[in-house]
Amino acid sequence: CNNINITTMMICHRYLLATLAIALSIERGTAAGSHSSWRRPSCNSLATTSENTRCASSSSITDDALNLPLKLRGGSTIADDGEITDEEEEDEEVEQRKIQQQKKEEFEKLSKYRTEQQILYQIRSTYLSEMLALRGVPLPTITSVSTADGDKPPEKVDWDCAMCTEEDPKSCLYSFDAEPNTKVVAPLGTDQWISLSALNRLRRTDPTKVEPMWHSRYSILKSWFADESEFSMLQHVGVKGFLVSSVLLDGGNGLVLRSLLIMTVLSVIITLMPLLEFIVGRIIVSAPFWAQWTTWGRVVRAGFPLKLLLGQLAWKGVATTFSKLENNVREYIVDMECEILEESVPLTVGVDSKKEEEEDVSDEEEVESEYDNLDGEDFDS
């Protein structure tokens, strides 16, 4: 369509130029004729020469007008067929580039969507693996692949136990110096001692701070305080230590202790119920109580929202009081557990350890002699 418009404009331009040249030549010829009519006639030769000159000039002007080069406004020439083809090629290239850019954007959007979906699938599979691992299914979890390059997971280690005395003081990782006449423990083959009571109290109050005491090199909790470990200290505590450690403190993550405490409180309340009823009855029928009717009567006649709010405040106070009572009881039981560990954990380093070994050997010999005596009496009978 653009080529047809350009060709039409070019033809019209050519015809306009030709018409303009013819009109110019006619006007000049008319002006020359009028000028020769009032001027004095010349000889025939001059007349003939002027006519020939006028005709030649008009014909030359017409030819020059027809042979003028056609130019567009601004001095540029009209493009030929080859230049028009180049413009079409440029337009096609621009369109192709736009199409390619659009395809690239669509591909990037698709790639981003697929990447997000892949990440979601991986997170979901990780979550399912963790849940199945918690239920006992042997699957790899985050902890099995979370070890950084160059780091080693905490290793299980045996322990040494020594007695801290004034003659042989021991350092303590928790309190610089251990108290005299207390037991201290350390990983086997090291001198990084810590008080046994302080270690047990720390694992009860904040277990996350136990292993960093040894720069997370040793798995202290799983090695020394787990029932399934061969290095566990709890294998020396006996029945009393089992009831205190495994039942009261570790049973149901403290649920056993809380249940026993609730039952104890309820038992005390039921036991004291007659006395409480007598006290409450005397208060209700007392004159000072009814003298404050203007104060507590507003609460009794208040709407349900205010009563609900007061009930929530009362429940919050009871829960806070019970929590403080539970913490106090738990601290008392933890101190009891520390005393049991101090009494039952054997010494492995120092003079006292040799005495204990000699006592154990003597006890074994006494038991063997008793068995021998029983066997001899049975044989005599």
Image (tube, rainbow, N blue to C red):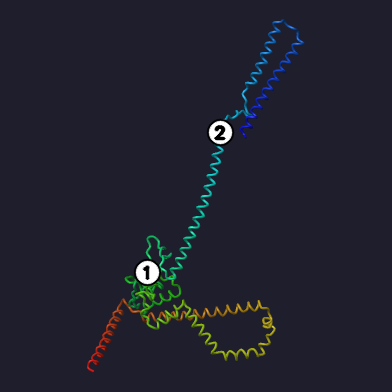
Is the residue marked by circle 1 packed among few (<14), some (14-19), or many (20+) residues within 10 Å?
Answer: many
Q: Residue furthest right?
A: 38
Is the residue marked by circle 2 packed among few (<14), some (14-19), or many (20+) residues within 10 Å?
Answer: few
Vertical order, 58 against 340 (above or below): above
Marks 2, 1: nearer the viewer: 2
Q: Residue furthest bottom?
A: 381
Secondary structure beneath disc 2?
Answer: helix
- In which quadrant will I find the N terminus? top right
Q: Observer-nearest residue: 354 or 19? A: 19
Q: Earlier in the sequence, mark 2 or mark 1?
A: 2
Which residue sits at x=56%, y=89%? Answer: 273
Which residue sits at x=28%, y=86%? Answer: 367
Residue type of the residue flagged with mark 1: Tyr
User: What percent of the width, then of the height, locates residue 280?
Assistant: 61, 89
Residue tagged 2? 85
User: What percent of the width, then of the height, locates residue 310?
Assistant: 63, 78
Quarter occupied by residue 89:
top right
Secondary structure beneath disc 1?
Answer: loop
Q: Observer-nearest residue: 363 or 45? A: 45
Q: Observer-nearest residue: 78 or 11? A: 11
Q: CA distance from mark 2 to mark 1?
A: 81 Å
Residue type of the residue flagged with mark 2: Thr
Quarter occupied by residue 177:
bottom left
User: What percent of the width, then of the height, locates residue 303?
Assistant: 68, 78
Residue tagged 1? 218
Q: Observer-nearest residue: 132 or 247? A: 132
- In which quadrant will I find the C terminus? bottom left
On residue 304, which mark appears? Answer: none
Q: Are marks 2 and 1 in contact (CB under 8 Å)?
A: no
User: What percent of the width, then of the height, locates residue 117?
Assistant: 50, 58
